């Protein structure tokens, strides 16, 4: 069994690496104005489900080892449990190997997207009403002197969801901008990423060998007579707008650049005239978000499970990403043992909840 567990951990690690590579390809396609294929989305969903099963199996294996050391169960009981666990390990390992093989035939490019603005699927926004109102004020005519807006805070607190909501509200209700452009950044991407995304949204074309300066000139020429809102999500390093060709916002052009980052210092480096901090959710909103993703009020009718649910929410520390993930994961967990295990998992990974 130990060898099978080791094989499962290795296979899962390799599958995660393949998943990360595929996500990178999808991200690059999006930056070039191309959508993701349904096959790629389905494969990624299957990978996520396999990861959840693996985590559950590893948790059961650890508890089994603890019982063996403590000798709390008879040998025959342990042998029966080991047999059942071995079957689950082998079944999950087969599923993971199948997913690894299927990944070789996955195409990510689902075709071109020509819109200059695009509605983005988002998670529900809980507890950010005041922040939303403040952002709307900054995008209004009365706040034209604040052209660069930085939204910062720890990872997972909802910065991206907040800005996605703004993007979608502008598209749904209408806006005063000629061009609305969304760019997803990351550690690996910089000014070139912005040029590719802006160029794709504006329908610009250039040769692969064209220099950054040449692309910047085309972008500047296309945007200088337009009122634009540029939304940059997940910025990790300082970006020189002049090098990208994006005109700097001012009172005359009435343009805006809004970005999210984990660093307040980066807001200053980027020249943000307004810095907004997105913080952890208060206890009431954290519980509301968790219950919303759980979707099973009947489970919480059990005093024991409700107590464990409250403990889990407390351990998440108001982090929306953790609350959403765990709320969805616990929707089909109906035994007290499973809820106790979820709470123990949080104890083993406290850094991720900070």
Image (tube, rainbow, N blue to C red):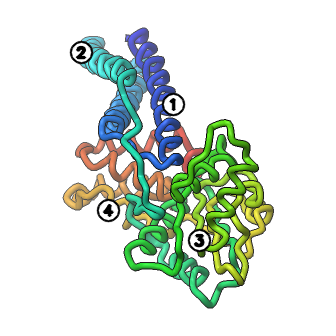
Q: CA distance from mark 4 to mark 3?
A: 36 Å
Instruction: Indicate the quadrant where residue 142 lies.
Output: bottom right
User: Residue drawn at (24%, 18%), measured in percent from left and top?
Assistant: 84
Sequence order check: which comes first, mark 2 or mark 4? 2
Nearest to viewer (mark 2 / mark 4) = 4
Nearest the eye: 106 or 318? 106
Q: Which residue is mark 4?
A: 292
Q: Which mark is residue 228?
A: 3
Along the horizontal axis of the image, is 61 left or right of 156?
Answer: left
Q: CA distance from mark 1 to mark 4?
A: 32 Å
Tags 2 and 1 in contact by the CB under 8 Å rule? Answer: no
Q: Is residue 70 above or below residue 27?
A: above
Tags 1 and 4 in contact by the CB under 8 Å rule? Answer: no
Q: Residues within 10 Å of mark 3 (few under 14, many from 20)?
A: many
Q: Which residue is mark 2?
A: 80
Instruction: Indicate the quadrant where residue 279 lies.
Output: bottom right
The N terminus appears in which quarter of the rendering? top left
Sequence order check: which comes first, mark 2 or mark 1? 1
Q: Is residue 349 visible?
A: yes
Nearest the eye: 62 or 181? 181
Sequence order check: which comes first, mark 1 or mark 4? 1
Tags 2 and 4 in contact by the CB under 8 Å rule? Answer: no
Sequence order check: which comes first, mark 3 or mark 1? 1
Q: CA distance from mark 2 to mark 1?
A: 39 Å
Q: Which residue is mark 1?
A: 21
Q: Is residue 135 above or below residue 18?
A: below
């Amino acid at each position: 069994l130990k060898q099978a567990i080791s094989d499962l951990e290795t296979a899962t690690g390799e599958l995660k690496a393949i998943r990360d590579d595929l996500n990178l390809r999808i991200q690059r396609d999006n930056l070039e104005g191309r959508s993701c294929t349904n096959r790629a989305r389905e494969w990624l969903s299957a990978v996520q489900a396999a990861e959840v099963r693996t985590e559950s199996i590893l948790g059961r294996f650890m508890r089994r080892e603890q019982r063996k050391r403590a000798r709390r169960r008879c040998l025959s009981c342990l042998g029966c449990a080991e047999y059942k666990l071995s079957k689950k390990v082998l079944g999950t390992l087969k599923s993971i190997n199948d997913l690894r093989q299927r990944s070789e035939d996955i195409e990510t490019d689902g075709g071109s997207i020509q819109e200059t603005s695009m509605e983005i699927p988002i998670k529900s926004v809980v507890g950010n009403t005041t922040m939303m109102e403040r952002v709307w004020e900054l995008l209004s005519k009365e706040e034209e002197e604040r052209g660069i807006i930085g939204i910062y805070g720890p990872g997972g607190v909802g910065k991206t969801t907040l800005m996605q909501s703004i993007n979608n509200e502008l598209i749904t209700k209408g806006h005063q901008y000629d061009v609305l452009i969304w760019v997803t950044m990351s550690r690996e991407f910089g000014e070139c990423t912005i040029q590719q995304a802006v160029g794709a949204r504006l329908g610009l074309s250039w040769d692969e060998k064209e220099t950054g300066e040449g692309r910047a000139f085309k972008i500047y020429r296309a945007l200088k007579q337009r009122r634009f809102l540029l939304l940059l999500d997940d910025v990790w390093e300082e970006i020189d707008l002049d090098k990208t060709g994006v005109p700097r916002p001012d009172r005359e052009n009435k343009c805006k650049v809004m970005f999210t980052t984990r660093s307040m210092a980066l807001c200053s480096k980027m020249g943000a005239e307004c810095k907004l901090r997105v913080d952890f959710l208060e206890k009431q909103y954290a519980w509301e978000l968790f219950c919303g993703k759980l979707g099973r009020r009947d489970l919480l009718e059990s005093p024991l499970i409700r107590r464990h649910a409250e403990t889990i929410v407390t351990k998440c520390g108001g982090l929306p990403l953790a609350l959403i993930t765990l709320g969805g994961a616990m929707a089909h967990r109906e035994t007290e043992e499973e809820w106790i295990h979820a709470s123990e998992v949080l104890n083993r990974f406290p850094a991720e909840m900070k």
